Image (tube, rainbow, N blue to C red):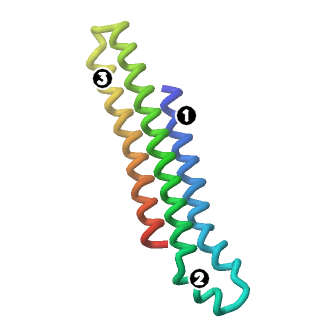
Amino acid sequence: MKLLKKSLLTIVLFFAAFALFSAAAPATVSYAAETEAEVEAEEGGDNATAGKAIAAAISIGIAAGLGALGMGLCVGKSAEGIARQPEAEGKIRTTMILGIVFIETAVLYALVVSILVIFVL
């Protein structure tokens, strides 16, 4: 259970870091211009869009990778637990499914925020 908590905490921290970077990327690009004409050209340009796409891709990639790692560890440990105590199979399976649902929910939230970063910011 400690490993599951650490995995979820790691996913949340990476998600928060990349959400911060994705919010800061367009501001960095627009402040780099020196004249008003360059600012106007870059606001509609591809630099901000490319930065958003890269930030969204990195954040969902890390969230999905860590989610898959957490799910794999969860299933492996539950299989070991069932092998050791076959009579507790129902409780172990229920707890495993609940943990997997929470991990998958965190990954789906990362996907939703990545989509929002691309289309809203």
Say the numbered circle drawn on residue 93.
3
CB-based contact (under 8 Å), mark 2 and mark 3: no
CB-based contact (under 8 Å), mark 1 and mark 3: no
Cα–Cα gap, marks 2 and 1 = 41 Å
Residue designated by label 2: 42
Which one is in front, 48 or 63? 48
Secondary element under disc 2, as helix, strand or loop, is: helix
Residue designated by label 1: 6
Query: 73 left or right of 43?
Result: left
The amino acid at mark 2 is: Glu
Residue 109, given in percent of the width and then of the height, sits at 41, 53
Q: In front: mark 2 or mark 3?
A: 2
The quarter of the picture where residue 99 lies is top left
Residue beneath the point at 60% across and 60% down = 20
Relative to 15, say whether 24 is above or below.
Answer: below
Label 2 or label 1, whichever comes before in sequence order:
1
Residue 22, given in percent of the width and then of the height, sits at 56, 63
Cα–Cα gap, marks 1 and 3 = 20 Å
Seen as rendered, the residue at the extreme right is 34
Secondary element under disc 3, as helix, strand or loop, is: helix
The amino acid at mark 1 is: Lys
Residue 39, given in percent of the width and then of the height, sits at 63, 86
Residue beneath the point at 34% across and 38% down = 101
